[in-house]
Image: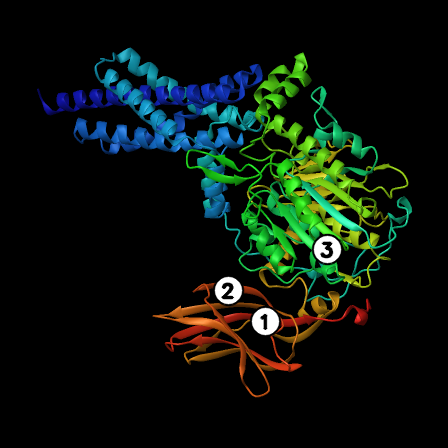
């Protein structure tokens, strides 16, 4: 046979082999979708709607896979002269890698009921590991599934190699691929936004989001405009361009008319309920899932258009307690916490006892760090519970999740009963309605939910029963909490604020705006009447509202504020309410301005029921885009550069005596044994708080640490402490220093870097503040 004949035969053989590869790829796509559908129905029950979505999805998969098939064909052609056995190994290897990618992605979807996107890149390794542990994954089952799928793929490839494909079969195969490609692009352009989370191809979705994330350059803010930002809030009197969030605050108690007078300063109880959607406290899918909260809102001040500012729980604590910005990925998750005010620090300066109760680990989203920086009196999380309560253990690795909400409330009331019954700020954060969705008395709540399920919603309740049962449980936990709290003598002197951190994402949400829609309920026995308010408000409006209510009850109420909110009833003819939201991927791309909503570069009109309808209005869209960009840039600027509030204004707002403050953004080279942070400074012998923020880069070996010490007038050391720092990273320490045993009323304080090996150091971004409290008698709100 001549060379042309041999080449022709080789070409035909290559076409046939690749046609077989195409068959194996289509088989893999079908197997993936089949496994996905089976697992969804197994975990959430059969649903006609989900089946329809999955059928649409498989059609979309078969069209969409034509693009990687063609790319694969080009690569295959380049190596087609290699040995057939080598090509086979490469082909099986690619299929093997595809399976390895698919299984974790579908496991994530089964856990979150959301396709995996840039979660891995936007969250810390601790958060990712926490998510894996709380998912209760069975790694043995995953391994068995992996082995089964790989065996099935190998069997398909082996069987295809035994089959001889004729010219017609080969032509049909390639024709299907070539027709599918333009058809895919046509369908994709027309229908891509109509694919729901079930029909979308999960691996393709993850890959596309990953590529967009990698190509996106969003690390730096653009040129900031302080004036444009401050014009977003025309009702505020801003006082400092260097610290653009600071404004004068003349607090009028707008809600005072709804309350009878409190005999003493009222206690404030803030209940943040995990996954609490506003929909849940009304009739929902034919049932009232939360009858207690439904009834409580009818006896309260209730805002039915309240919004959380984050799609996940990372945003809720700093927003409710401080009206704070988000930074790059959530206020509490920043490498350096900017100096800031909060209800905790302000009320503590007014002799309130402050506490945070949480049934899980307070380390999550670094809540503990936030509260410590605000000098909270008590952080009570899952490490401190009594042995009387049952731990929630999940997964084959026996991960300790925490405690359910009934136990959280019972334990917290036990603890509160042991505390000084003076005025208090108590913050609760529930967790039962969060993965792993574990409840006690599960049979009881299963039967209860089945009793609620109307025939027309039967499929819905079957699919989402795992999550909805926890909603029933949480409502009972709240009812028990209020029932027990009523027995306390300070019940009538307490204001309760109940809201959600964000709507539960595991159940369908009507539209993108409702991802942020949560209830806001304010209840007290001192209320004169109930009232429903329909103005748009957010968690940012809560801190200023509370401080206004307390205006006549606390001796020191700051005359300035940095809160991004106003008050819950603030209405002005010259102000259109605006809210910028941070989504689950830590992107600030959703913006509400009056009754217009901008989301992912699309403009919507919002009606009174929060239904949204896309509209075309380039003028408003461009204006909102500019406002959003202005907010986003200032949000990053103040957080990255510690420009929320100056040390002077901070101390004035909290009635603190500033002992020493120093800032220097320049980089300083040093190699001496001692590098001064705070020069020897005269201090009173009383409790003090020290904040040190700096960045230290080392070259070569280093054994450096940060030291602070207190001496008396004879230079005798009364206190000496040292601690390490994060090399080549920002170091931030917040230290509460107790009064030292000494007869001297005046002592001396200094702090320095002890560079024992005389290493070469670069110290930059220094920000130091040493302060102590003033007596309440010195309070002056001016």
Q: Looking at the image, is mark 1 or mark 2 earlier in the sequence?
A: 2
Location of mark 2 (residue): 731
* SS for dot 3: loop
Foreground: 151 or 243? 151
Foreground: 400 or 596? 400
Residue 626 makes an appearance in the image: no
Q: Is residue 251 above or below residue 670?
A: above
Q: Which quadrant holds residue 245?
A: bottom right
Foreground: 689 or 547? 689
Q: Which quadrant holds residue 473?
A: top right
Foreground: 248 or 613? 248
Residue at point 61%, 52% (across, down): 379
Numbered label attached to residue 420: 3
Location of mark 1 (residue): 768
Could you tell me if the residues under marks 1 and 2 are in contact, i.e. CB atoms within 8 Å?
no
Could you tell me if the residues under marks 3 and 2 are in contact, i.e. CB atoms within 8 Å?
no
Residue at point 58%, 53% (across, down): 368
Q: Looking at the image, is mark 3 or mark 2 earlier in the sequence?
A: 3
Residue 116 image offset from top left, x and y in percent: 49, 35
Side of 43 where 222 appears, left or right? right
The image quadrant where one finds the C terminus is bottom right
């Amino acid at each position: 046979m001549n060379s042309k004949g041999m080449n022709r035969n080789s070409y035909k053989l290559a076409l046939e082999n690749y046609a077989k590869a195409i068959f194996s790829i289509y088989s893999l796509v079908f197997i993936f979708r089949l496994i996905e559908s089976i697992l969804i129905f197994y975990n959430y029950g059969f649903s006609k709607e989900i089946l329809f979505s999955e059928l649409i999805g498989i059609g979309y998969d078969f069209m969409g896979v034509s693009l990687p098939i063609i790319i694969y064909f080009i690569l295959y052609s380049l190596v087609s002269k290699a040995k057939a056995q080598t090509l086979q190994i490469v082909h099986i290897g690619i299929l093997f890698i595809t399976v390895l990618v698919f299984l974790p992605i579908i496991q994530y979807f089964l856990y979150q009921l959301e396709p995996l996107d840039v979660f891995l890149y936007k969250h810390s390794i601790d958060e990712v590991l926490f998510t894996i542990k709380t998912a209760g994954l069975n790694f043995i089952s995953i391994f068995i599934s992996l082995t089964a799928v790989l065996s099935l793929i190998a069997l398909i490839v082996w069987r295809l190699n035994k089959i001889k494909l004729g010219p017609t079969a080969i032509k049909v195969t390639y024709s299907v691929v070539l027709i599918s490609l333009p058809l895919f692009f046509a369908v994709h352009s027309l229908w891509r936004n109509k694919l729901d989370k079930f029909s979308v191809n999960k691996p393709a979705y993850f890959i596309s989001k990953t590529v967009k994330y990698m190509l996106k350059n969003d690390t730096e803010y653009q040129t900031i405009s302080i004036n444009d930002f401050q014009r977003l809030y025309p009702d505020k009197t801003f006082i400092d361009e260097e610290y653009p969030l600071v404004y004068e605050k003349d607090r009028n108690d707008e809600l005072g008319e709804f309350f009878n007078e409190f005999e003493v300063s009222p206690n404030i109880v803030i209940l943040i309920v995990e996954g609490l959607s506003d929909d849940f406290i009304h009739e929902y899918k034919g049932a009232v899932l939360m009858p207690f909260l439904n009834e409580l809102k009818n006896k309260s001040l209730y805002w039915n258009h309240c919004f959380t500012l984050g799609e996940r729980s990372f945003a809720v604590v700093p927003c409710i307690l401080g009206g704070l910005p988000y930074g790059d990925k959530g206020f509490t998750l920043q490498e350096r916490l900017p100096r800031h005010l909060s209800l905790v620090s302000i009320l503590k300066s007014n002799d309130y006892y402050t506490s945070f109760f949480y049934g899980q680990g307070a380390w999550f989203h670094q809540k503990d760090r936030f509260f410590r920086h605000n000098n909270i009196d008590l952080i009570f999380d899952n490490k401190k519970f009594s042995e009387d309560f049952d731990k929630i253990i999940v997964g084959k690795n026996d991960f300790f999740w925490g405690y359910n909400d009934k136990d959280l409330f019972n334990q917290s009331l036990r603890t509160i009963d042991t505390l000084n019954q003076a005025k208090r700020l108590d913050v609760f954060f529930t967790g039962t309605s969060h993965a792993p969705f574990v409840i006690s008395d599960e049979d009881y709540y299963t039967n209860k939910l089945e009793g609620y399920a109307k025939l027309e919603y039967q499929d819905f309740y079957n699919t989402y029963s795992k999550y909805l049962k926890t909603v029933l449980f949480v409502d009972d936990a709240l009812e028990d909490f209020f029932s027990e709290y009523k027995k306390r003598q300070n019940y009538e002197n307490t204001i309760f604020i109940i809201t959600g951190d964000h709507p539960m994402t595991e159940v369908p949400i009507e539209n993108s705006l409702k991802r942020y829609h949560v209830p806001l309920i304010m209840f007290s026995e001192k209320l004169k009447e109930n009232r429903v308010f329909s103005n748009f408000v957010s968690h940012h409006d809560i801190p200023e509202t509370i401080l206004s209510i307390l205006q006549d009850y606390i001796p020191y109420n700051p005359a300035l504020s940095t809160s991004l909110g106003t008050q819950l009833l603030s209405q002005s003819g010259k102000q259109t309410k605006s809210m910028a939201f941070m989504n689950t991927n830590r992107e600030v791309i959703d913006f509400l301005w009056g009754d217009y909503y901008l989301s992912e570069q699309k403009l919507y009109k919002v009606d009174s029921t929060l239904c949204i309808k896309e509209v075309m209005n380039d003028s408003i869209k461009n204006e909102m885009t500019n406002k959003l960009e202005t907010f986003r840039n200032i949000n990053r600027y103040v957080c990255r550069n510690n420009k929320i509030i100056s040390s002077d204004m901070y101390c004035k707002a909290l009635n603190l005596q500033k002992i020493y403050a120093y800032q220097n953004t320049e980089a300083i080279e040093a190699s001496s044994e001692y590098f001064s942070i705070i020069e020897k400074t005269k201090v009173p012998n009383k409790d003090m708080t020290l904040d040190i923020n700096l960045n230290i880069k080392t070259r070569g070996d280093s054994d450096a640490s940060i030291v602070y010490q207190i001496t008396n007038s004879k230079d005798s050391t009364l206190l000496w402490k040292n601690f390490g720092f994060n090399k080549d990273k920002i170091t931030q320490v917040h230290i509460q220093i107790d009064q030292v045993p000494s007869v001297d009323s005046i002592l001396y304080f200094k702090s320095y870097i002890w560079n024992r090996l005389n290493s070469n150091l670069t110290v930059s971004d220094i920000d130091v503040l040493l302060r102590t409290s003033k007596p309440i008698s010195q309070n002056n709100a001016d």
